[in-house]
Structures are given as structure tokens and as C-alpha cells.
Image (cartoon, rainbow, N blue to C red):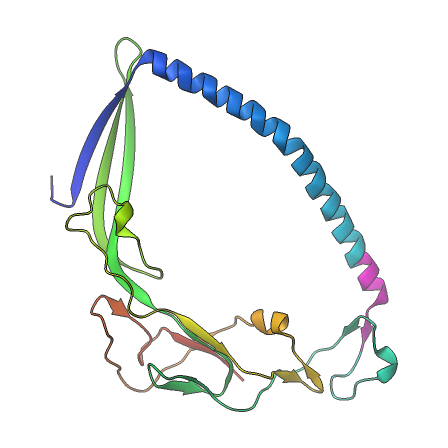
Amino acid sequence: MSEDSFSTTSSTGWFSRIGDSIKGVLFGLVLIVVSVPVLFFNEGRAVKTRKTLDQGAKQVVTVSPESPDPTKDGKLVYFSGEAVTEGTLEDTQFKVSAEALKLRRSVEYYQWEEDVKTETKKKLGGDEETVKTYNYNKKWTSSPINSSNFERQAGHENSSPTVEGNSWAASPITVGEFTLSSGLVGQIDNFTSLSSGGETELPHPDCRSTSGLRDREARRL
């Protein structure tokens, strides 16, 4: 067995299993009682949302973003066009800039990951034996892994992140004469890869970012 893998064994008696089963039944009954009003509330909200959408579909009017009609003020309107902005977004830490609506820095971390496999065997007398096998491997991940929750922390410590992902949005972003709200700007998520054209030294060897490679992304105009 390698140093990055080990197993633990535990046994559960017949009476303990019966007790756990009773607790599970009682907990299930409680969930049933609680789920009925929750389900009723969700169904009511779904019906209300559907009625609102149907009403909106009947009242929506199409307008031109280039020449707004004052008579349509206060009404539900629909328009389409190209979203544009002025200026440049910049990631000063990695010296990357782009004429874009949004700029996003994606970071990956080379860290330990714990994988747990559980195997349960029945023994004579109604007892159960549970064997848990813990495997540790290093891999690139898009978010930090907290190694303090590992069963075996020694030798598998993950350092705290020194570089984190970030995003920037241009302001204002307009479509014709209309300015997009923060809610609409937040829905812009069609990113494409952007190269910085050079390498940037990272502050920690177990971290990688776009740094002129493939992970920095921006929404081009």
C-alpha cells in the first residue's frame, strides 16, 4: 500500500443497526410532514410565475434601441442590438487588457485531493464491517481544496491561495440609446480565450493562471 493510500475499519452491531433504522424511519416521517407545505408553496409560486409570464407576453411591445419612443415609457418592451462600451478593461496584476464588455481571470490550483471509497460487508451474527479507503492524488482544480478536512493531513497540506480568480465589467454598457442594468450585465457570460502575449511569473509554484496562456477570458465586443 502506497503512502498516499490507507484504510480504516469499523464495525456496527446488530442492535446499533436496528436503532439507526428506527431513527431513519422517524426522520423520513418528519420530512414527509415538512415537505407537504413546501411543495404546496412551490406549486403556487410556479403557477403565479406562469401567469405573470403569459400576461407579459401579451403586453410586450417591440421598440428600436436607436430611437426610443417616449410613448412606450412604463411599458414592457423588447429590443435587440449590439452591446458596446468605451474604454479598456485591465487586469493590472497580470498586465492583461482588452476592449471588452467583461474581463475574467480564471485560476487553477495544483493541490491534493482526497478520494474516499467505502465498502460494507456483513458478518455472522448480524454485524457489519465497514472499510474506508482514502486515496490522495495531486491534480489541477478550479477552486482551492481545504486539506484541514482530510482524514490524513500530514504530507497532504494544501497551501492557501495567493492568486484568486476575478472579473471586471465595463460601465456603462449600452445597446443603442439604452443602458444595460447591472442585472443584465451580470448575465453576460460568453467568454473567449485571450492571450496576454507574454509570460507573467506567478507568486506561488502551485498556482497557474492565464498569464499569456489559455485561462484568461474576455467577452470581446
Residue 39: image quadrant is top right
| Left or right for 7, reference 94 | left
Specify whether residue 205 is painted magenta.
no
Q: Residue at x 65, y 78 (%)?
A: 180
* Secondary structure, magenta segment, majority class: helix
Q: Residue at x 74, y 88 (%)?
A: 66
Q: Nearer the viewer, residue 75 or 203?
A: 203
Q: Which residues are magenta?
A: 54-62
Specify whether residue 57 is painted magenta.
yes
Measured along the vertical axis of the image, is residue 74 above or below residue 160? below
- Looking at the picture, how far across and down is residue 128, in whole percent? 29, 18
Q: Nearer the viewer, residue 164 or 187?
A: 164
Residue 108: image quadrant is bottom left
* Residue 49 appears in view: yes
Residue lying farthest to the bottom in this orientation: 87
Task: Tell me the quarter of the image containing the N terminus.
Answer: top left
Q: Nearer the viewer, residue 60 or 184?
A: 184
Residue lying farthest to the top in this orientation: 125
| Left or right for 56, reference 162 | right
Measured along the vertical axis of the image, is residue 199 above or below residue 2? below
Measured along the vertical axis of the image, is residue 107 above or below residue 120? below
- Looking at the picture, how far across and down is residue 201, in whole percent? 23, 79
Q: Residue at x 15, y 51 (%)?
A: 155
Measured along the vertical axis of the image, is residue 208 above or below residue 139? below
Q: Tell me how many marks there are.
A: 0
Q: Residue at x 85, y 84 (%)?
A: 70
Task: Tell me the quarter of the image containing the C terminus.
Answer: bottom right
- Looking at the picture, how far across and down is residue 211, in whole percent? 31, 79
